[in-house]
Image (cartoon, rainbow, N blue to C red):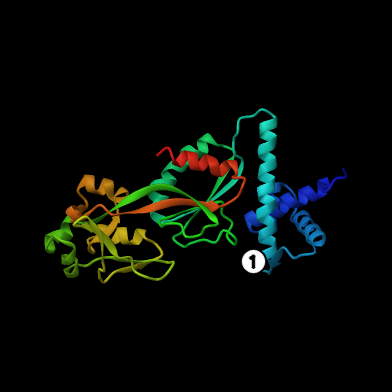
């Protein structure tokens, strides 16, 4: 059997993947300990071999073509498999290596994921974490992520979903706000209050507040002078500064409630929740780094 890839071609594939992951030939060269010209030559060799353009470059930016992105995903998967195969054969423990790219929404990232990442990295010191904190939905076919965490049910059958938790929702306000306003005793009373709004980036709609009434989930459309977009933490800052009422995940405000800085409102109607789900593209082979992250988050 003749060789399909020689040493130069394999090296070119590795440098190509680095260029995609770092966003530039210069950064890829620095990471690999070679010159930018060497990265450029490697990409040129691949483009000649494939008869396809892999990057679109301007003086200010560089991005992969559709073909380049598709090729990158397959190459990265293959390289990860080779690394793990060598680890198994050499008798080493199964330890993930490389870069794990995660997209997570604001609140889950700050209050659930980030506090745990230090421990995760201490377990797997050869793993680098690339974290994007964003409430925008991602497209795995275009965006360079291994996994994403989202606060909604999965609709895409081409993705695998692992439920992380069902996060309880409650309504809170500061003692100062409640001192100057009547305390609502039922959801209908919210019509007479400042209710801080958040607009979903995915569809531009404000999120209705949900409650349990007579053992049924009800949705209440609320209004208020403050409407926040993109950064959900802005709503939390507003409510802590007495701007009004806000429906938020209990895990976000637990310490504020314990200190008395916030007070839960309408506790008799609480009990609704939203799921947080880890998603990743379906594949027969799930990379070790993803499996380790799934196992780690399942511990909590």
Q: Which residue appears at 47% of the width and 60% of the height? A: 155
| Residue annotated with mark 1 | 61
- How many marks on residues? 1
Q: Which residue appears at 11% of the width and 63% of the height? A: 182
The quadrant in which the N terminus is found is: top right
Q: Which residue appears at 64% of the width and 29% of the height? A: 92
Name the side, left or right, on which 249 lies relative to 38.
Answer: left
**Could you say whether the residue bearing mark 1 is in a helix, strand or loop?**
loop
Instruction: Give whichever of 226, 198 is nearer the camera.
Output: 198
Q: Residue 88 location, x and y as percent?
A: 66, 32
> Is disc 1 surrounded by few (<14), some (14 to 19) or many (20+) residues within 10 Å?
few
- Outermost residue on the top side: it is 91
- Outermost residue on the right side: it is 2
Name the side, left or right, on which 287 lies relative to 271.
Answer: right
Q: Is residue 114 visible?
A: yes
Q: Residue 268 location, x and y as percent?
A: 17, 53
The quadrant in which the C terminus is found is: top left
Q: Is residue 27 visible?
A: no
Q: Determine the image quadrant of residue 81.
A: top right
Q: Which residue appears at 43% of the width and 48% of the height? A: 163
Q: Residue 286 location, x and y as percent?
A: 59, 45
Q: Residue 181 location, x and y as percent?
A: 13, 64
């Amino acid at each position: 059997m003749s060789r399909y890839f020689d040493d130069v071609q394999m090296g070119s594939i590795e440098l190509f993947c680095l260029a995609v992951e770092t966003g530039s030939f210069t950064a890829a060269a620095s990471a690999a300990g070679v010159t930018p010209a060497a990265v450029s030559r490697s990409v040129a060799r691949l483009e000649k071999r494939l008869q396809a353009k892999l990057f679109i470059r301007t003086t200010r930016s560089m991005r992969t073509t559709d073909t380049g992105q598709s090729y990158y995903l397959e190459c990265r998967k293959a390289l990860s498999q080779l690394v793990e195969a060598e680890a198994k054969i050499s008798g080493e423990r199964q330890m993930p290596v490389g870069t794990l790219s995660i997209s997570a929404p604001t609140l889950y990232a700050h209050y659930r994921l980030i506090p745990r990442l230090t421990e995760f990295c201490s377990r797997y010191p050869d793993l680098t974490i690339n974290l994007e904190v964003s409430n925008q939905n991602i497209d795995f076919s275009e965006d360079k992520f291994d996994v994403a965490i989202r606060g909604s049910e999965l609709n895409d059958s081409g993705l695998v979903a692992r439920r992380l938790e069902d996060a309880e929702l409650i309504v809170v306000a500061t003692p100062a706000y409640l001192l100057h306003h009547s305390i609502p005793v039922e959801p209908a009373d919210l019509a007479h209050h400042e209710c801080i709004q958040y607009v979903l980036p995915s569809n531009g709609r404000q999120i209705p507040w949900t409650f349990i009434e007579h053992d049924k989930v009800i949705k209440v459309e609320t209004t208020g002078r403050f409407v926040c977009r993109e950064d959900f933490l802005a709503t939390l800052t507003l409510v802590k500064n007495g701007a009004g009422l806000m429906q938020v995940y209990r895990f976000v405000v637990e310490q504020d409630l314990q200190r008395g800085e916030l007070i839960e409102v309408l506790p008799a109607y609480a009990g609704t929740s939203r799921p947080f789900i880890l998603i990743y593209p379906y594949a027969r082979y799930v990379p070790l780094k993803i499996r380790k992250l799934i196992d780690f988050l399942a511990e909590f």
